[in-house]
């Protein structure tokens, strides 16, 4: 089985990640923030697009680093991956959230921490499930 993932596969993996997150987060955040579903959906979509670009970039760099250091995908590397992904996203997303919702940076940070508490396990579980299903699929395909 190959660990190499093409750019197309990386894009599909990231789009799946963001679409599922959008479907979960938009109604939940709309309810928590008492904001219209459309407004929260647009904010979530914008942050999701930003996250999509970061996801593709980080995944490619992270896989290259694992390959270069000859490290396997393990629980610890997945935790590191999730922390790097969310940390990079927080640095950019908090100012955007503050601006979009017209709240302070501190309020945006607190909101983002709440969202982070969802996304840390979500990121870990999504990529673990993706790799698990991908591995099973590749074992069944004789071309790989």
Image (cartoon, rainbow, N blue to C red):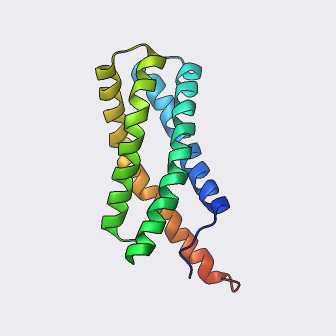
Q: How far across and down, in percent of the image, does residue 104 sit?
A: 33, 16
- Determine the residue located farthest toward the front in the rendered image: 68
* Residue occupying image coordinates x 48% and y 63%: 129
123 to the left or right of 131: left
In terms of depth relative to the viewer, which is nearer, 123 or 24? 123
- Write down the quadrant of residue 11 in the picture: bottom right
- Determine the residue located farthest toward the top in the rendered image: 102
Q: Is residue 34 visible?
A: no
In terms of depth relative to the viewer, which is nearer, 70 or 48? 70
- Determine the residue located farthest toward the bottom in the rendered image: 142
Classify the position of the N terminus by image quarter: bottom right
* Residue occupying image coordinates x 36% and y 32%: 112
Q: Is residue 25 visible?
A: yes
Classify the position of the C terminus by image quarter: bottom right
Whether residue 76 is situated above or below residue 23 in the rendered picture? below
* Residue occupying image coordinates x 54% and y 75%: 135
Q: How far across and down, in percent of the image, does residue 132 sit?
A: 50, 70
Q: How far across and down, in percent of the image, does residue 70 sit?
A: 39, 78
* Residue occupying image coordinates x 52% and y 31%: 44
105 to the left or right of 68: left
Whether residue 138 is situated above or below residue 112 in the rendered picture? below
- Write down the quadrant of residue 125 in the picture: bottom left
Q: How far across and down, in percent of the image, does residue 16 sit?
A: 59, 51
Count the numbered circles shown: 0
């Amino acid at each position: 089985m190959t660990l190499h993932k093409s750019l197309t596969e990386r894009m599909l993996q990231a789009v799946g990640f963001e679409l599922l997150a959008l479907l979960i987060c938009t109604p939940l955040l709309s309810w928590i923030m008492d904001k219209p579903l459309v407004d929260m959906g647009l904010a979530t979509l914008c942050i999701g697009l930003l996250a999509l670009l970061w996801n593709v970039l980080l995944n490619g760099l992270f896989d290259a680093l694992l390959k270069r250091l000859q490290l396997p995908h393990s629980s610890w590397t997945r935790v590191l991956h999730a922390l790097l992904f969310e940390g990079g996203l927080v640095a950019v997303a908090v100012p955007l959230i503050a601006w979009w919702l017209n709240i302070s940076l501190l309020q945006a940070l607190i909101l983002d921490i709440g969202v982070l508490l969802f996304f840390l396990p979500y990121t870990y579980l999504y990529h673990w499930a993706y790799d698990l299903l991908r591995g099973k699929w590749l074992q069944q395909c004789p071309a790989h």
